[in-house]
Amino acid sequence: MTTTLDKDNMLAAYEDVRNDSSDTAWAVFKFEGTSVIVDSTGVDYEEFETKFGDDERAFGFVRVFTGDELSRRAKFTLITWCGCDVSPLKRAKMSTDKPLIKTVVQSVAVEIQTSEKEEITYDAVKSELCKVGGANYGTGARD
């Protein structure tokens, strides 16, 4: 069965997360039958973390601010979630579904593929973004 996308709504959610004048910080896309739809969007990262279940396949797109007081900037992450209770067939299908998602989610600094909740916490995602984010000069004291 071919996976389809609710592309217009997904693109609107993606653009809302990327919009600097919007408070929306994340979007979650989930499977409904053979279609991927916008499940939810929001502001609070703690709510975002609750959107991924052990029996679900989903994609999360999230904005996190990195940098220091001299160079604060928004960075974006695509999370590919495949819960530990997902069947092997559906798990394998994620490899062909992810390129479809990337026709909508085109600009990210980091991609995370996981079934572990610890890897999608705010601190874990921010740590991955800081690794690829360039220099952090700051004005703090030196050791």
Image: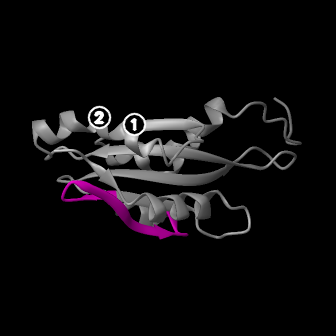
Instruction: Tell me what residue is drawn at x 19 percent, y 38 percent.
Output: 91
Looking at the picture, tell me which residue is in the foreground, 101 or 69: 101
What crowding class fits label 2: few (fewer than 14 Cα within 10 Å), some (14-19), or many (20 or more)?
Answer: few
Give the residues drawn in magenta, as a range. 30-45
Q: What element carries label 2?
A: helix
Q: Which amino acid does label 2 sit on?
A: Thr
Q: Residue 99 carries which label?
A: 1
Residue 53 in which image quadrant: bottom left
In terms of secondary structure, what is the magenta stretch mainly? Answer: strand
Residue 36 located within the stretch drawn in magenta = yes
Q: Which colour scheme is used?
A: one colour
138 to the left or right of 102: right
Q: Is mark 1 on a helix, strand or loop?
A: helix
140 to the left or right of 31: right
How many numbered marks does the figure carry?
Answer: 2
User: Looking at the picture, how far across and down is residue 1, in whole percent?
Assistant: 16, 44
Q: Are marks 1 and 2 in contact (CB under 8 Å)?
A: yes
Mark 1 vs mark 2, CA separation in Å: 6 Å
Instruction: Tell me what residue is drawn at x 47 percent, y 62 percent.
Output: 8
User: Looking at the picture, how far across and down is residue 107, in whole percent?
Assistant: 60, 42
Residue 11 located within the stretch drawn in magenta = no
Q: What residue type is labelled 1?
A: Pro
Q: Name the residue under label 2.
A: 96
Instruction: Tell me what residue is drawn at x 69 percent, y 34 percent.
Output: 133
13 to the left or right of 51: right
User: Looking at the picture, how far across and down is residue 12, in whole percent?
Assistant: 54, 64
30 to the left or right of 13: left
User: Looking at the picture, how far across and down is residue 97, in whole percent?
Assistant: 31, 40
Which quadrant of the rendered structure holds the C terminus?
A: top right
Instruction: Tell me what residue is drawn at x 74 percent, y 30 percent.
Output: 134
